[in-house]
Amino acid sequence: MTKKRSIFPNFITMSNMIMGFLAIIFANRGDMNSLAIAGILVFAGSFFDLADGALARALDVESPIGVELDSLADAVTYGIAPGIIAYNFYLYKLPEICCSVNLGMIIALLFPICAVYRLARFNVADKQNGFSGLPSPAAGIMISSVPCLATAELPILGDAGFTMPVEYYIPMYVVTAILMVSRVDYNKLFSDIAKKGKITVVVAVILIALLLYFFRMWSVFTATAIYISCGIVKYIVRFNK
């Protein structure tokens, strides 16, 4: 009976991976609208990523295979997909090194490598006091949401039209990747919200819905940037003390 119940959270986990796989397909089309859709799909994967663990705990079917599936799905959606999105968005423009290999390919590799290592380290780490290193979902969403700000042709995006200069995007890409394998501590944001009770969860859900409705992907990019920046600031303050 337990094995049958575990099908439901595992299916949600696989849905996260499906979002990442579809994001890769759209990103490889190369046009701006497809890249924006790819970014939205990576963000959509985060809802499945949150739901699978919650459902597994509710059904009391948490298992080692569920943990492994979750990590593999995250590797696709928040590691490989953002790297491909970044390459097709900006990095392909960088100069060739040799044998049809350009600098953008080398830089693009950094993100999936760091994400996969981060996920492997997370599986064997003590998770009681927060996350050591930037969680891969936040990192993947940060990188993948940027193309969504550059097009105004998709209704779901609202008023966009902002293009981040490549001089800013590449350092952001590299720093975000390195943060995943760093020792910078990050709070368990959604777990902390859930622990505060149902009312807090409902308020948080309503707030997220309102932000998405009024500010669309700008709210996603800004909220993720604030979360990442807070971890860095907290680490610097702690280091100086």
Image (spheres, rainbow, N blue to C red):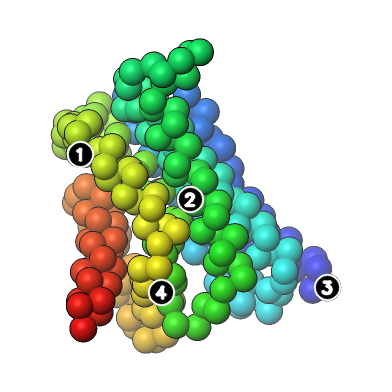
Residue holding disc 4: 188
Taking 113 as reference, is 164 above or below it?
Answer: above
Residue holding disc 2: 114
Q: Quadrant of residue 121?
A: bottom right
Q: Regarding mark 3 in the picture, which secondary structure is present there?
A: loop
Residue holding disc 1: 168
Disc 1 marks which amino acid?
Answer: Tyr
Q: Earlier in the sequence, mark 3 or mark 1?
A: 3
Q: Label 3: how many residues lie within 10 Å, few (<14), some (14-19) or many (20+)?
A: few
**Mark 2 to mark 4: distance in Å?**
20 Å
Pick the front one: 135 or 66: 135
Q: Regarding mark 2 in the picture, which secondary structure is present there?
A: helix
**Mark 3 to mark 1: distance in Å?**
52 Å
Residue holding disc 3: 1
Disc 4 marks which amino acid?
Answer: Lys
Is any part of residue 207 visible from this angle?
no
- Residue 195: image x %, image y %? 42, 85
Q: Earlier in the sequence, mark 3 or mark 4?
A: 3
Taking 142 as reference, is 168 above or below it?
Answer: above
- Dot 3 and dot 2 residues touching (CB under 8 Å): no
Disc 3 marks which amino acid?
Answer: Met
